[in-house]
Amino acid sequence: MCGFAGFLELEHRTSTEGLQGVALRMAERMLARGPDADGAWADKEQGIAFGHRRLSIIDTSNAGAQPMASASGRWVIVYNGELYNTEEMRRCLGDQASAFRGHSDTEVLLETIDAIGVEAAATRANGIFAFAAWDRRDRKLWLVRDRLGVKPLYWGRTGATILFASQPKAFLGHPNFRPEIDGDALSAYLRYGYTPAPLSIYKGIRKLPGGWLAEISADGRVDERCWWDIGAIAEAGQAAPEPLDLDALSALINDAVARQMVSDVPLGAFLSGGVDSATVVAAMRAQENTPIRTFTVGFDEAGFDETQNARTVAQLLGTDHTELRLTANDLPELFAGALEGLDEPIADVSLIPTFAVSRLAREQVTVVLSGDGGDEMFAGYNHYDIATKAWNLARRFPGPVGHAMRGSIRALGPLLRTLPLGPPTAQYSADRLAKVAELLPEDDAISLYRRLVSVWPEPDQVSPRFARHGDATLASTQTPALALPGRFQCFDMLGYLPETILAKVDRASMATSLEARVPLLDHRIVEMAWRISPQDKRRYGVAKWPLREVLNRRLPQLTNQPKMGFGVPLGDWLRGPLRSWAEDALTGNNVQTGGLVDADVVGRYWREHLSGKRNWQHRLWSIIVLTHWQRQWLGS
């Protein structure tokens, strides 16, 4: 993968050399995204500048260098990503392809744009990508993000300048940018643990949602529109579901994995031991006779360690397996390393093991395949079932009687959290049940689900300085009226998936100059998954049944593995070996001087967590991340 940045001056004053210099400084802020080479291009008369950092994967020669101009001279592009149907796209160009300078996917994408236009080229592409393309003839800037939002893309306006980049840290290299926190975005972060598109944590900077593009004219007019609509795809698929065809699903997964194994540099895979990553590695093994390099991390604490499962998968598939064990003492150093790439806060503690396994993998390979996306597509999360049952209960008992009954159920919350239920997984279940007991006053399904997955359900409780954010503008709330749990899945695919799961993998891997690919999110698999009925996704009470059956054909020993997630024993660590480190971020001047949250409220939750009466690890972690992020990126 790579990193790009640039800007469009609406009032042209800067020389070509000046434009290129600023573009290079912006790109330099993302050195880890592209350690192999850099490049810049500018047009003084049109006021446009591109900067690029390259991580060489396909066509490592100078023929793949960026920024790249089309053979016609009309288009210039900077691009971050990978196309998996390059040869098909090349053949579609006919004689135009005979003049290619190299075999990079960048050139194929660029010449396809020249031949059929930006939106049509994006629609033809199978891959993960974000790019900026300048049309020299029509004087227009095009910003495009891939269907699922795997690759990041930010843009905004400062004065008479349009800025754009793979990550907002690049904007710090432009002399006119002054970072300032957006209050609505902060409120959304506290609620969800991430900043949902189109918001970004920085005022005046927008995050282009997955499947969207922005067409920006030289006079500053902007047209943002959706070119691939996951909501429409989900609605059409559920309206006309098709009989489950496991042969077709298995073949499509194999094809997606085979396409994504193309690389001119060493390649491996993340292997957690769960169904999703095991399915990907099994498909990789079917394509490759030599051992696949696989990587995992684990913990000593029971209930959080999947290394034995991963080791079993590795042995059954004959992979060249490497594992790393983490302790509480490793977390502060890993967190500091991950924070270098985390220029927008993400309150998912699994960022830490993701960064650790990325750094481990980068010692041997430059590209890895990951199993992300299976839960969102195939309804694998336990809370889909929980939220559906809670909503059905809420609908069954409306009015005063239902209100009184729901009040009684909510009163059980504190009791549930204090029951001695044994291992961490049981305590997690108690925490989740207690949260469900607090859901029932919600008057619609998405409101109930948002509350279930919220970190701080009432953000103004901890951040009264900022008005409570309304969700009406968020891409993740624009969900069609699907049968449950489909609407919950769609909500996650618009919000949680791109802004937490994929953003976490992108930032952690790119911080180590590692390219991570996600074959289960091939858009053809996503579209097929939405044509599978909810009943077939959860047969016999088994979540993610179709994916388990695909894996069962190769590894029947693993299909009954329970879902664990990529968790960290954070609650106990905060009370024990990490207590001093956590207090540095949660108490005293570090919270008070930032002024973003109420130090007294945070202190109260911290003391209650230390007492062991409640497990507030997620809320506390969101504040720890925010405090360190603010210190790192805003200097306060």
Image: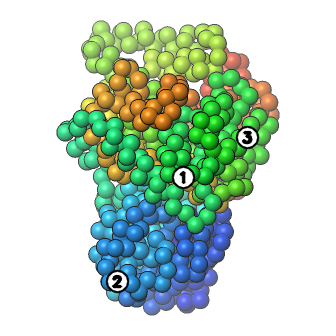
Q: Identify residue for label 3.
A: 324
| Residue 511 place in picture, x, y as percent | 65, 57
Whether tag 1 and tag 3 are in contact, CB under 8 A, the answer is no
Q: Would you name the residue on which mark 2 appears?
A: 96
Q: Nearer the viewer, mark 1 or mark 2?
A: 1
Which of marks 3 and 2 precedes in the sequence?
2
Q: Which mark is residue 288?
A: 1
Q: Is residue 282 above or below residue 119?
A: above
Q: Amino acid at mark 2?
A: Gln
The residue depicted at 63 percent of the width and 60 percent of the height is 266
Residue 272: name its quadrant. top right
Q: Nearer the viewer, mark 1 or mark 3?
A: 1
The CA span between labels 1 and 3 is: 25 Å
The residue at the far left in this view is 240
161 or 49, which lies in front? 49
The tag earlier along the polypeptide, 1 or 2, is 2
**Residue drawn 43% across and 61% down?**
84
What kind of residue is marked 3?
Answer: Leu
Residue 211 percent location from the top left of the image: 36, 57
User: Which is in the foreground here, disc 2 or disc 3?
Assistant: 2
Q: Where is residue 226 drawn, in percent x and y?
A: 31, 58
Inter-mark Cα distance, 2 to 3:
49 Å
| Disc 3, SS | strand
Q: Secondary structure at mark 2?
A: helix
- Asked if marks 2 and 3 touch (Cβ < 8 Å), the reply is no
Q: Residue at x 43, y 11 (%)?
A: 409
Quarter assignment of residue 247: top left
Asked if residue 375 is positioned above or below residue 505 in the image, the reply reads above
Pointer 3: residues within 10 angstroms few (<14), some, or many (20+)? some
Q: Amino acid at mark 1?
A: Glu
Quadrant assignment for the N terminus: bottom right
Q: Within 10 Å of the Cα at label 2, are there few (<14), some (14-19), or many (20+) other Cα atoms? A: some
